Image (cartoon, grey):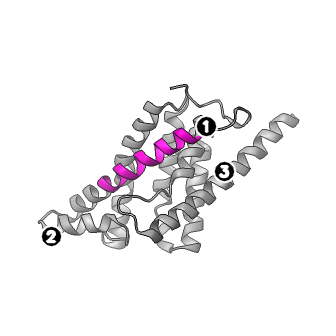
Amino acid sequence: MGNNNNSDTRILVIAALATAINVIIGDLVALLNIPLLYLDTLGTIFAGAAFGPFWGAVVGLTTNLIMGVTTSPTAIPFGLVNIAVGIIAGLIAKKGFTIIKALITGLILSVVAPLIGTPIRLYLFGGFTGSGADILISSLRAAGQEIFASTFIGVVVSNFVDKIISSLIVYFILVRLPIKYKPNTIGSN
């Protein structure tokens, strides 16, 4: 029983660190205005891949609530996207998080996140949130694309880069963890 409590405490501490990583790195990347990159779901993907969909969802929701208070209230509704990111990463990593699964995770997230986020962007913010994707959305709108298509395509393109890079970073972190800290979901490839 004592070992289970230690494991629960360890997961809580790592989940808190994963949330902090999302907020700090997400804010840093936004401050640097790096196009097509957010890195604000690194911790969510890590928690999902390492500890399962529940913990991924918890980290995702907590991240957006904190960012909504510390950075911008616009982050709060996108908590739904971050919850989905954690659940998907956790489900894909159920039997290990190999490099192939990291790539698959990134590809799936690059479509699912915009499917959830596009209606939020459109309904609450008219399609524009001040992110790097706004440039793509504006260009597509200027080329005559409808608002939903412009927003969805713009967000998919930016998420394609961000979610694949984020998933690969998580894979390389998990592989390099010292053995005593490794969750049992890490693949050997």
Q: Nearer the viewer, residue 131 or 151?
A: 131
Indicate the position of residue 17 as horizontal and vertical percent values: 67, 54
Q: Quadrant of residue 122?
A: bottom left
What residue is shown with label 2? 142
Quick check: is 161 in the magenta stretch? yes
Q: Residue at x 74, y 34 (%)?
A: 180
User: Badge 1 local density, few (<14 within 10 Å), some, or many (20+)?
Assistant: few
Indicate the position of residue 178 as horizontal and vertical percent values: 69, 36
Q: How far is disc 2 from disc 1 in space, using C-alphas?
A: 46 Å
Q: Residue at x 36, y 41 (%)?
A: 107
Please indicate whether residue 188 sits to the left or right of residue 30 in the image: right
What residue is shown with label 1? 176
Q: Are marks 3 and 2 in contact (CB under 8 Å)?
A: no
Indicate the position of residue 162 as horizontal and vertical percent values: 40, 52
Chain part drawn in magenta: 156-173
Q: Residue at x 50, y 59 (%)?
A: 79
What amino acid type should be assigned to the residue bearing mark 1?
Arg
Indicate the position of residue 153 as horizontal and vertical percent values: 25, 55
Please indicate whether residue 164 sits to the left or right of residue 26 in the image: left
Q: Secondary structure at mark 3?
A: helix
- Nearer the viewer's eye, disc 2 or disc 1? 1
Quick check: is 136 in the magenta stretch? no
Q: Nearer the viewer, residue 102 or 85?
A: 102
